[in-house]
Amino acid sequence: MPITAIYPGTFDPVTHGHTDIVRRGACLFDRVVVAVAANPGKSPAFPLETRVEQTREALKDVPRVEVIGFDSLLAHFVREQQATVILRGLRAVSDFEHEFQLAAMNRQLAPEVETLFLTPAEEYSFVSSSLVREIARLGGDVSKFVSPGVARMLARDPGVAD
């Protein structure tokens, strides 16, 4: 039976750390759905459609990966996609407490779904979307942290972190 994993996030913007997790997941699962959350509570800098487009562009060369925007409860989206795994990235110990809480809640909402944590390559373990937005806003070079398309978009709109 094919295994589908959901990799949810805001991806505001998608970074090499995110794409590293997706690439690792694509080696483990038959299908990986990158679920770009609308997440209005976080007040994303970019609209959902832009984040979906950015993420598709960054992952266009990775087989068995789909990018889908969603604005529902993650447990509902996982069931809609007939997935059995939620894939999450852990950059540092500081991420663990929040991720552990999310995993426990998702287990209550969808007990048939397992959460699997992966760590990014060491060179991306410090990269976050908020840091990338801040560097871009202050005129720094973000090309080491994001795909060329995302870097171009951030260069066109450096005030996005305001």
Image (cartoon, rainbow, N blue to C red):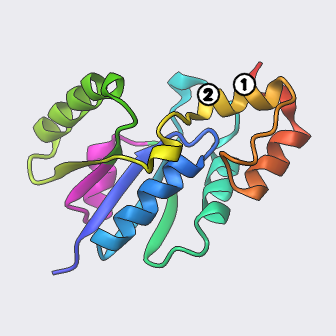
- Asked where in the image residue 149 lies, by quadrant, the reply is bottom right
- Total number of numbered labels? 2
Instruction: Give the magenta part as a residue range.
Output: 72-87
Task: Name the residue that disc number 2 marks.
Answer: 130
The answer to whether 79 is drawn above or below residue 120 in the figure is below
Q: Locate the C terminus and report the quarter of the image it occupies.
A: top right
Q: List x then y, in percent, for residue 136.
A: 79, 32
Q: Tell whether label 1 touches label 2 (CB within 8 Å).
A: yes
Q: Residue at x 74, y 50 (%)?
A: 150
Residue extending farthest to the top is 162
Whether residue 13 sits left or right of residue 2 in the image: it is right
Q: Is residue 34 visible?
A: no
Q: List x then y, in percent, for residue 97.
A: 25, 23
Alpha-carbon distance for marks 2 and 1?
6 Å
- Asked where in the image residue 28 lies, by quadrant, the reply is bottom left
Task: Name the residue that disc number 1 marks.
Answer: 134
Q: Residue at x 67, y 49 (%)?
A: 146
The answer to whether 140 is drawn above or below residue 18 in the figure is above
Q: Which mark is residue 123?
A: none
Q: Locate the N terminus and report the quarter of the image it occupies.
A: bottom left
Instruction: Identify the element where label 1 is drawn.
Output: helix
Q: Is 47 part of what is drawn in magenta?
A: no
Residue extending farthest to the right is 156
The answer to whether 75 is drawn above or below residue 84 in the figure is above
Callout 2 amino acid: Ser
Callout 1 amino acid: Glu
Frontmost residue, 83 versus 101: 101
Q: Residue at x 52, y 62 (%)?
A: 67
Whether residue 59 sits left or right of residue 82 in the image: it is right
Instruction: Identify the element where label 2 is drawn.
Output: helix
- Asked where in the image residue 92 lies, by quadrant, the reply is top left
